[in-house]
Image (cartoon, rainbow, N blue to C red):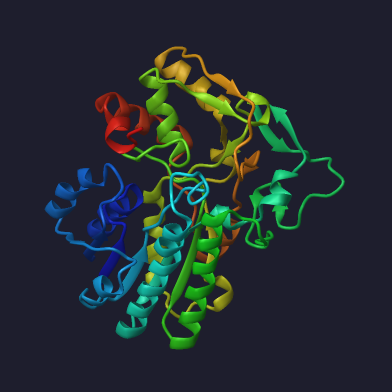
């Protein structure tokens, strides 16, 4: 199969490229190389036989010039929940990248009768019920209060499932991904090509381009090792906020199953994919892990809240398990150790991938 992979030189894209090439697929990789660090993946992917194209999803002419492929995997996005609202980035560019780019790819799929897989995000889920979630602290980490009179619909012991509310606000970033999901499913139904939506938890692993607003596991471990200043922001400044963690290589088996099942019923075309409760870590727990691995390093407290912050986000991937027999394969401790080994081997990684 010939696959067009967008964001091919990013962390997620390059990880998937290695896996898909190993499965025998022909890959065309598209990247605009605006993300610091993305150039570092170019040489390796070319050596693997990936045909790399320097292009911009926002430019329809760049997409129109691409050769026909059998499937598109969209791993390109501005993935920061603060994008467009932090005073450093443009809200218009966020929408152009994440939603306009999706539109251009869907037109490509319509023209070439190609399948389409969108890597979406847990941040499509509504912020108010998550921000108001009753939580308690256990082992330096928030968890939903099991005895609470009522929890939001779609939230259970295993986490947040696909029925959880997606009403605004979800952040501008979340809104672009949610709109892209809807547009993709409509295009697929209208023009008769297969579409799959995979809502990912936090993706992490060695070589990720970590920043405080994205790639938090890689950013924290690299910063801790190099003794850079770190802060627990909001929530009392204790670092109890929790996220789950998934290695992107664990997505590849799911993609293979979706490629082979273009006639999948509409109700099974959208699933959560994450490390789930077994991978959930708080920032405080991550610091404790780093202290055991590298020695102690102080973390400051910053009580000021950030926009769109929530105390706890863990996805329930039971639907993916039922539909695709998919489960994450890389334990969170293996992900953290992989990042740590990479950080030790590349002490300048944050300067390369997240210049301040």
Position of residue 331 measured from the top left corner of the image (x, y, whole percent): 46, 38
Residue sitting at the far right: 149
Q: Against 216, is 65 above or below?
A: below
Q: Against 289, is 147 above or below?
A: below
Q: Look at the image and tell me whether residue 244 can be seen.
A: yes
Image quarter in which the C terminus is found: top left
Q: Against 145, is 41 above or below?
A: below
Position of residue 97 measured from the top left corner of the image (x, y, whole percent): 39, 61
Residue located 14% across and 54% down the image: 46
Residue located 29% across and 24% down the image: 344
259 left or right, relative to 80? left
Q: Look at the image and tell me whether residue 23 can be seen.
A: no
Which picture quadrant has residue 277?
top right
Residue located 25% across and 62% down the image: 30
* In the foreground, 32 or 182: 32
* In the foreground, 289 or 310: 310
Image quarter in which the N terminus is found: bottom left
* In the foreground, 92 or 133: 92
Position of residue 257 measured from the top left corner of the image (x, y, whole percent): 41, 66
200 left or right, relative to 211? right
Residue sitting at the far top: 296
* In the foreground, 118 or 223: 223
Position of residue 47 measured from the top left corner of the image (x, y, whole percent): 12, 52
Residue sitting at the far front: 87
Residue located 45% across and 42% down the image: 214
Residue sitting at the far bottom: 191
Total numbered badges shown on the rendered structure: 0
Which picture quadrant has residue 16?
bottom left
């Amino acid at each position: 199969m010939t696959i067009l992979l967008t964001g091919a030189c990013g962390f997620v894209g390059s990880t998937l490229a290695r896996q898909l090439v190993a499965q025998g697929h022909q890959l065309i990789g598209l990247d605009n190389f605006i993300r610091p660090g993305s150039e570092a993946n170019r040489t390796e992917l070319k050596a693997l036989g990936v045909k790399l194209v320097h292009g911009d999803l926002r430019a329809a002419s760049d997409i129109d010039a691409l050769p026909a492929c059998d499937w598109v995997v969209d791993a390109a996005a501005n993935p920061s929940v603060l994008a467009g609202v932090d005073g450093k980035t443009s809200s218009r560019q966020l929408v152009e990248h994440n939603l306009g780019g999706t539109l251009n790819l869907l037109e490509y799929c319509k023209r070439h009768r190609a399948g389409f897989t969108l890597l979406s995000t847990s941040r499509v889920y509504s912020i108010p019920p998550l921000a108001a979630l009753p939580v308690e602290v256990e082992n330096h980490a928030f968890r939903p209060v099991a005895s609470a009179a009522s929890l939001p619909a779609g939230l259970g012991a295993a986490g947040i499932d696909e029925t959880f509310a997606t009403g605004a606000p979800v952040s501008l970033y979340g809104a672009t991904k949610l709109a892209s999901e809807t547009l993709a499913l409509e295009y697929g139904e209208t023009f008769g090509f297969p579409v799959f939506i995979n809502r990912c938890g936090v993706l992490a692993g060695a070589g990720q381009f970590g920043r405080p607003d994205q790639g938090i596991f890689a950013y924290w471990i690299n910063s801790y090792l190099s003794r850079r200043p770190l802060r627990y922001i909001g929530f009392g400044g204790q670092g109890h906020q929790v996220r789950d963690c998934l290695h992107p290589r664990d997505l590849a088996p799911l993609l293979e199953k979706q490629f082979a099942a273009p006639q999948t019923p509409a109700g099974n075309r959208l699933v959560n994919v994450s490390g789930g409760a077994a991978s959930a870590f708080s920032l405080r727990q991550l610091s404790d892990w780093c202290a055991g691995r590298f020695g102690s390093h102080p973390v400051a407290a910053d009580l000021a809240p950030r926009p769109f912050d929530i105390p706890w986000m863990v996805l329930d991937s039971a639907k993916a398990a039922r539909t695709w027999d998919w489960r994450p394969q890389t334990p969170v401790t293996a992900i953290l150790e992989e990042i740590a080994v990479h950080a030790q081997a590349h002490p300048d990684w944050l300067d390369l991938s997240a210049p301040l």
